[in-house]
Image: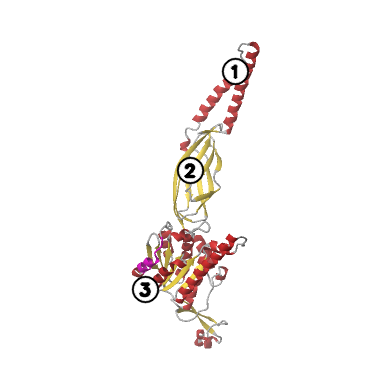
Amino acid sequence: MKFTARFIWLLCIWLGVATADALLRLSTFLQTKQAAATWLADAWYVGAILLLALLIAEWLSLTQLNQIKVSRKVAHTLPVNNFCQVELSVENPLSRTIIFNLDEHLPEFCSARNLPVTLSLNAGQRATVDYQIKAVERGDLCIKSTELWVNSSLSLLKRRVILECESVSKVYPNYRSIHNYLLLATEQKTNQLGIRQRQQRGDGLEFHQLREYRTGDNLRQIDWRATSRMQKLISKDYQQERDQNIIFLLDSGRRMRTKDDELSHFDQALNATLLVSSIALRQGDAVGLKIFGGKELFLSPKKGPSTISAMLNYVYDLHPSSRASDLVAASESLLQQFKKRSLIVIVSNVRSEDCAELKTAVSLLKKHHLVLLANMKEQILEDVLHKDVYQLDDALRFSQTIAYIQQREKLHRSLSHDGVIAVDSLPRNLAVNMVNQYFDIKRSGRL
């Protein structure tokens, strides 16, 4: 319960009358040496009684506010870092009009648009408040209650009312953006994403259909029987071989806690993993996932659209830990859990000091599998390279950054010599770079 500005003004007026009466009495006493009654005395006495009566009446008007009813509609699944619609209904069962400010008790990792709001409801009236929430962390999102600050009948008092109305949603990786990628990931539109389509070569391709000859087609693609029958050049069209396995080895150690913007490197890596998984599943491949560096999880390779749903339910509440990642142990564990030849995609932030550990892990994996390292680097490295150099500190920072980048390049060249496909990428470009490498591998038939 708190007083409103209207009550403060009334109280100030009453205090002014009382002060004027006191000053007038004091002036009269100093002049006549005796106390004298003034007409202001009656005014502030009556004002005091009226204020007290008003406060009692106002307090009584705020005694049944717990009867106000609220209900909330929010989706059961929400994409991380995206604003989503929420509908909140408020019903006034009281016999008078109520004016109130409304707000929601949201978790710390949530922000809201169009809140708080001020509403006025007549007796028996229902109103709907539409607002948007954005969660910047994955996991369970629980909105437990709604907070109202309700004005009394004459708006002299305000009372805080907490109405219990629990809603539980799951905040998933931003699959909406992944869906947008998939809408563009076709033969005609992938260039809009920076995804390159490679010419087919080698083995590992399945016959898809016959079509007219196109400039640049290999002579081995020409179907001479169909050509003689149709009296024009007919080529065989191929598609990637199906029934291949892709397993993502996703790091959830302390380095993946790094943030370049609102999302951590782990979230960026998870989004990229889901994108490549969706494309691979559409190509007919089986996709699996192994998490290491924190909570150890393994999802064996599976096919079909339901695989993405399983992956989302598997990792939606998973966050990077504060532990150091052990890539060698994760590789040994994976070899025990799955032995069929697969494309192993390591998604991590590996540095030059990890060279010995990385090479040990890769040597274990590449005996049976094809290995792709999707290595994430911090955005600050690019920022330093594009900053102007004015002082000695700037020059030292620039030179050290160049040295650090050269060490990473040396590590990647060494891995390439060992038969590992290595990609060094900023988090924002990771998804497209991984898709490009996936298409390269499929088109070349290396898997």
Give how far apart the Cα atoms at labels 2 and 3 are.
Answer: 53 Å
Give yes or no for contact between labels 2 and 1 (Cβ–Cβ under 8 Å). Answer: no
Residue 292 is situated, as x and y percent measured from the top left of the image, at 40, 63
Residue numbers of the magenta segment:
324-334
The quarter of the rendered structure image containing the C terminus is bottom left
Residue 340's disc number: 3
Q: Along the polypeptide, which appears first: circle 2 or circle 3? A: 2
- The local secondary structure at tag 2 comes to strand
Q: Main secondary structure of the magenta part?
A: helix
How would you rate the neighbour count of disc 3 (Cα within 10 Å): few for under 14, some for 14-19, many for 20 or more? few
Name the kind of residue labelled 3 in the image: Lys
Q: Name the residue under label 2.
A: 146
Name the kind of residue labelled 1 in the image: Asp
Q: Is residue 217 magenta?
A: no
In terms of depth relative to the viewer, which is nearer, 134 or 387? 387
Side of 446 relative to 113 (left or right): left
Name the kind of residue labelled 2 in the image: Thr
Q: Along the polypeptide, which appears first: circle 3 or circle 1? A: 1
Viewer-nearest of discs 2 and 3: 3
Viewer-nearest of discs 2 and 1: 1
Q: Name the residue under label 1.
A: 42
Side of 49 relative to 171 (left or right): right
Looking at the image, residue 65 lies above or below residue 49: below
Residue 201 is situated, as x and y percent measured from the top left of the image, at 49, 81
In terms of depth relative to the viewer, which is nearer, 49 or 234? 49
